Image: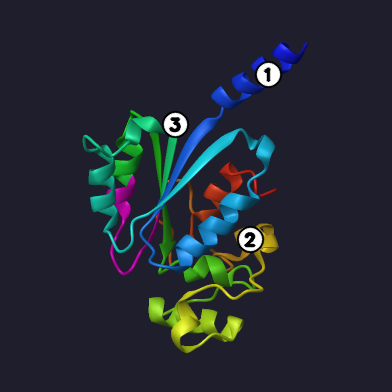
C-alpha cells in the first residue's frame, strides 16, 4: 500500500502543467507575481516558474524565448506580463497567439501595470498616460519617492475578485485573452483565473 501511495504521488507530480511567467517589469510586477505565485493552491496542478526580464522589450522576450536556448518547449504554457508603455502591443500579441509549440499568452496592461494594482483599491479612471496612472496609484497607497514603484506592505492581495471587475472603466468591457484593451485596462484577470486565484 505504501508503494501505491508513493507511485500516485509521483504520477501527480508528473501530470502537473508547467507554467512560465515572464515579466519585464523592474520591480513592481516582479514583487506582485512573487507573492501571487506563493498563493497558488497546491491542488491547482501547476508547476510555476517566474522569470524576470528587467527592461526587455516584449518582442525581444518572445524572440529569446523561441530561440535555441529560450526554453519555450520546456513549458506547457508561457505568460508574458508587459505594459503598454505608449506602444501598440497588438503585433506582439498576435505573435504570441501564433506560436504552436506551447501556449503563449501576452498579458498587457494599458497604460501600465499600476492599472491592475489600483483596481485592488477602487475602480480605475481615465488616465492621460502612465505617469497619470502611477500618480493615482501613489495617492491610493500613500507612497512617494524611492518606494513609489514597489508594493506597500499592506497591499490587498485578497481583493483580486474585486480588481477583476474594477480594472476597466464603466461602459468598457474587459479585454479578451491575448488582446490589448482600451485605456485603462489589463488582461491580468486571465492570468489570475488560470492560477486558480480568481473566483469569477
Nearer to me, 183 or 5: 5
Tell me the residue that label 3 is attached to: 76
Which disc is residue 6 wearing?
1
Residue 75 drawn at (x, y percent): 41, 33
Residue range corresponding to the magenta coloring = 81-93
Residue shown at 35%/39% (left/top)?
97
The answer to whether residue 173 is visible is no
State the image quarter where residue 163 is shown.
Answer: bottom right
Tell me the residue that label 2 is attached to: 165
Is residue 122 shown in magenta?
no
Q: Is residue 54 left or right of residue 34?
A: left
SS label for mark 3: loop
Marks 1 and 2, how far apart at CA? 42 Å
Residue 82 drawn at (x, y percent): 38, 58
Q: Residues within 10 Å of mark 2 (few under 14, many from 20)?
A: some
Is residue 84 shown in magenta?
yes
Amino acid at each position: 500500500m505504501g508503494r501505491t501511495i508513493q507511485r500516485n504521488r509521483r504520477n501527480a507530480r508528473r501530470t502537473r502543467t508547467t507554467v512560465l511567467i515572464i515579466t519585464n517589469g523592474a520591480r513592481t510586477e516582479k514583487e506582485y507575481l512573487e507573492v501571487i505565485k506563493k498563493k497558488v493552491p497546491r491542488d491547482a496542478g501547476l508547476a510555476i516558474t517566474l522569470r524576470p526580464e528587467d527592461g526587455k522589450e516584449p518582442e525581444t522576450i518572445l524572440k529569446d524565448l523561441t530561440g535555441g536556448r529560450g526554453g519555450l518547449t520546456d513549458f506547457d504554457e508561457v505568460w508574458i506580463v508587459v505594459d503598454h508603455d505608449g506602444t501598440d502591443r497588438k503585433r506582439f500579441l498576435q505573435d504570441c497567439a501564433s506560436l504552436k509549440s506551447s501556449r503563449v499568452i501576452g498579458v498587457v496592461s494599458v497604460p501600465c501595470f499600476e492599472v491592475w494594482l489600483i483596481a485592488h483599491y477602487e475602480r480605475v479612471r481615465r488616465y492621460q498616460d502612465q505617469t497619470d496612472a502611477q500618480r493615482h496609484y501613489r495617492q491610493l497607497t500613500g507612497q512617494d519617492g524611492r518606494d513609489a514603484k514597489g508594493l506597500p506592505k499592506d497591499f490587498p492581495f485578497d481583493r483580486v475578485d474585486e480588481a477583476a471587475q474594477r480594472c476597466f472603466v464603466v461602459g468598457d468591457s474587459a479585454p479578451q485573452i491575448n488582446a490589448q484593451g482600451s485605456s485603462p485596462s489589463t488582461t491580468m484577470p486571465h492570468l489570475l483565473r488560470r492560477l486558480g486565484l480568481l473566483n469569477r
